Image: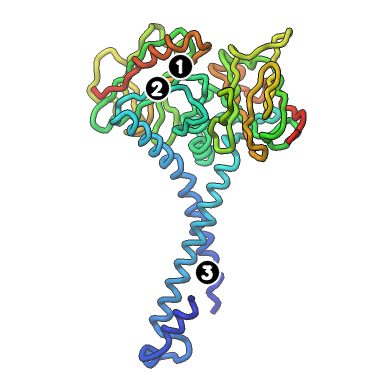
Amino acid sequence: MVQVLIRAGVSGPVRRSNPEPGRGSNGGKSLKLALKLVAVVVVALIVGAGSALLFVRGSGLGGTISVGPWQTSLVIGSAEADPYTRARVAVAGLLALNRSETIYFTAAHDDAGDALRSGCVYKVAGTDPPARWWSMTLYGADHYLVANSENRYSYGGATVAREADESFIITVGPQETEGNWIPAGSQTDDTFSLTLRLYNPEPAAVSNPSGIALPHIVKEACPS
Amino acid sequence: MKTWPMWVAGTIALAAAFHILTVFGLPYGIMDRAMAGIVAEAGDVNKPVYPESATAASRGIVRPSPDLLYTACAYDVSERPVKLTSPVPDTYWSLSTFASNTDNFFVVNDRQVKTDRIEIILAASENAATEEGIPVIVTPSSKGIVLFRSLVPSEDLRAEIDAKRRQSNCKPL
């Protein structure tokens, strides 16, 4: 299509006015230049905006602080947040509170580093994190709650059933199990993530989130 | 003279500019959309909405907590300050305010409020005319979002906590 247009530009009366025969008319050159500029803008837009979206959307809330499979950032919700953190919060955690009020840990992988998948069964085992109140919630890859027949999306410090030693085990998977169970949805190929919220965390947790003991996430099986 | 290196360099520079613009612009765009959603539901800015607990059908805000009852309003202090009022329940509760770039510039929770009711004024500047005796929070942007969070620790308490949070309000002075 481009070649056809350029040829059209160098034919007929226009060609006679060209001071350099055989190299295209002014109109042809202008058209060629315009097409090149459009191509540059389109490619730059796709690469520039696309890479930004991939970078921001692909990592959840992200963060540089890791505790096992859980990640957080000290600057979520804060004016000190860098532009990438702010963009990630906007995409995956809009209206998140700053860390003195709430620490958000997110896990998209299990302890072995494998992505969390709806078709697999996981045991999430731990003890109460150092906070006034905590909850663990499951989100789909689109960052929204996952539909299930139980309408159950989370457990919190006040609702989780505990073991004799006050620790807890939560099963995450597609099939109902005894005890604490968070349904992971029915789409076996889907990925999901877990967010652990620590409301009013203890001062030591605020100053050193990487030192908090958080639940382990262990894959038990992938039946489907 | 070959011009393709210049074209490649120009494309890379322009791509970098689009990348930076996208990263910086996303928070504002997403907040704008969230504010528009709240305004559409409330009927106006500086008016509260009282959505039910989040479910899988909720699509207003990403990663909502199903354990909380949220009350929200989109504030606009460009013309006059906005007064926030709410009863403070005997459970986890917080009032938080967010600038147009998503920054959480103020938060207070039930343990920090010494009475069973809170009154706060949002204003564009310290010099704005407000009501005497009520704390004033200066907003870093003229528009943003106010969010009240109320924890529902058990279903037995849901009705009581829901009734209280429906008394939370945002109103221009």
Q: Quadrant of the C terminus of chain B?
A: top left
Check disc 2 and give the amino acid type: Thr
State the CA–CA distance, disc 2 to disc 1.
Answer: 8 Å
Q: Quadrant of the N terminus of chain B?
A: bottom right
* Secondary structure of residue under mark 3: helix
* Secondary structure of residue under mark 2: strand
In which quarter of the view is residue B108 placed? Answer: top left
Q: Is residue A219 left or right of residue A151?
A: right
Residue on which disc 3 sits:
B6
* Residue pictured at 56% horizontal, 30% vertical: A147
* Residue pictured at 38% horizontal, 38% vertical: B32
Q: Chain of mark 2?
A: B
Residue B37, placed above or below residue A156:
below
Mark 2 vs 1: CB contact within 8 A: yes
Q: Chain of mark 1?
A: B
- Asked whether residue B167 is in view, the answer is yes
Residue B95, placed above or below residue B154:
below
Residue on which disc 2 sits:
B71
* Secondary structure of residue under mark 1: strand
Q: Position of residue A181 (x, y in %)?
A: 66, 21
Residue on which disc 1 sits:
B150
* Residue pictured at 60% horizontal, 40% vertical: A59
* Mark 1 or mark 3: whose residue is earlier in sequence: 3
Check disc 3 and give the amino acid type: Met
State the CA–CA distance, disc 1 to disc 3.
Answer: 58 Å
Q: Position of residue A49 (x, y in %)?
A: 50, 52
Check disc 1 and give the amino acid type: Ser
